Image (spheres, rainbow, N blue to C red):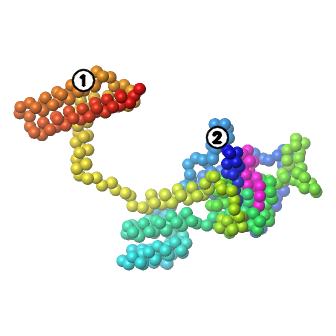
Amino acid sequence: MRAALVSLSRQCVLLLGASAVSLASGQVPAGLPTERPGQGIGIGQPLPRKPGATGSIVIGGPVSTPPLPSDVELNAISVDPWLVAIVEQLASASFEERVAASDALLKKQADQRQLMALLARPNLDREARARLITALQQRILKAPRGALGVRMESMRDELGVRITGLVPGMPGEKLLRVDDLVYAIDGDAVSIREDLIRIVQSKEPGTTVTISVHRQQRDAKGKGLLDAKDAPLYDKHDFDIALASTETLEVKGGPEPANLLPSPISLEREALAAAVAERFGEKPQLLEAPARVEAEQKARALDQHPVVREALASLELLRKVGGADEATMQLLLLEATKLRKQADRPGVSEVERAHLHALADRVDAIVLEISRIRVRIP
């Protein structure tokens, strides 16, 4: 069962559209090179990876969120007049007009940076700001994605991603071949399938990218050539290919095995959408009832009394190392009794009497908590 899940997780279908092709052949007599173009973090770069306990590559690490533009950068952006007009309607007195303006923002595919520039303006009312943030998040999450039209698997040895199949009718089948090893796209390293997915899906459909592959040399009969050490001989090829869209892939690719790993671009876009809400949304304010605030202030004042502090220290020690003996508890109860006797002395003011009883009650409550924890500790 586990082997089947691993097999499924290694399969993927991407889409590539073909345009021009440039070919650079070069024999690699000792197998594939081990050096790869530089890797970085951000859209179109490989996912963070770290060595596992067994030396394997573990896909993961923090999801990279592209930094949002600064206020200075946003203030310098020129916003299209039609977009300004729609945003003004978000503050209309008519509910119907506000809803229509929200729908228009989603349908017109407004530029993300222009939407951010509008959100950076301080004169937006609350509803307009909320609707504008929603439109921007939808624009981020549902932006078109490029695709290649290839099935693939990771080689798990830093040599690249091996093409295992080509989607009929898609651009990739015109230039790429099964068993090609894709090791870079536009100079960015491709070592595992998630690298390829991330780079391709971060680009708009129609974007032309350079796919760098190693293709095994073959004789006239199509048999793969090997060197003296039985290592495959490869040629380098660079193909310029125009990306198609993931929507086209869904039509031409047909039903595919479920991908058990989430798309890295999906995770990145979700992180970016959350960052937008954090940056431009109204900050929540915690409003506390006056009575609760007063009670907490009184409790903090009680906790500064030496007897209460000693009781709290015993409780903390018990929680950390299981230490709070019976003698300590008896001493604390004795101190609580002394506080009550002080409260009942003649001449004590009502305010002082209430304070002393509150201190005693606080000590009793802490001792009770200590008793409960000691019962639970074996």
Does residue 244 sit above or below 362 in this rendering?
below
**Mark 1 and mark 2: Cα distance apart in space:** 55 Å
User: Residue 50 sits in which quadrant?
Assistant: top right
Residue pictured at 36% horizontal, 77% vertical: 93
Q: On the rendered structure, is 262 left or right of 220?
A: left
Position of residue 217 measured from the top left corner of the image (x, y, whole percent): 87, 53
Q: Residues within 10 Å of mark 1 (few under 14, many from 20)?
A: few
Residue 56 against residue 314 in the figure, above or below? below
User: Which type of secondary structure does the marked residue at label 2 adopt?
Assistant: strand
Judge whether residue 349 can be spotted in this image.
yes
The amino acid beneath tag 1 is: Leu
Q: Residue placed at 65% from the left, 67% from the top?
A: 247
Q: Position of residue 248 (x, y in %)?
A: 68, 68
Q: Is residue 161 magenta?
A: yes
Q: Which residue is mark 2?
A: 51
Please identify the quarter of the rendering in which residue 350 is found. top left
| Residue interval drawn in magenta | 152-166
Residue displayed at 70% across by 45% down: 3
Which of the two residues, 70 or 138, is positioned nearer the viewer here? 138
Please name the predominant secondary structure of the magenta segment in the image: strand
> What is the crowding at mark 2: few (fewer than 14 residues within 10 Å), some, or many (at least 20)?
few
Residue shown at 54%/64% (left/top)? 140
Occupied quadrant, residue 315 = top left
Instruction: State the SS at label 1.
Output: helix
Q: Amino acid at mark 2?
A: Pro
Q: Is residue 280 magenta?
A: no
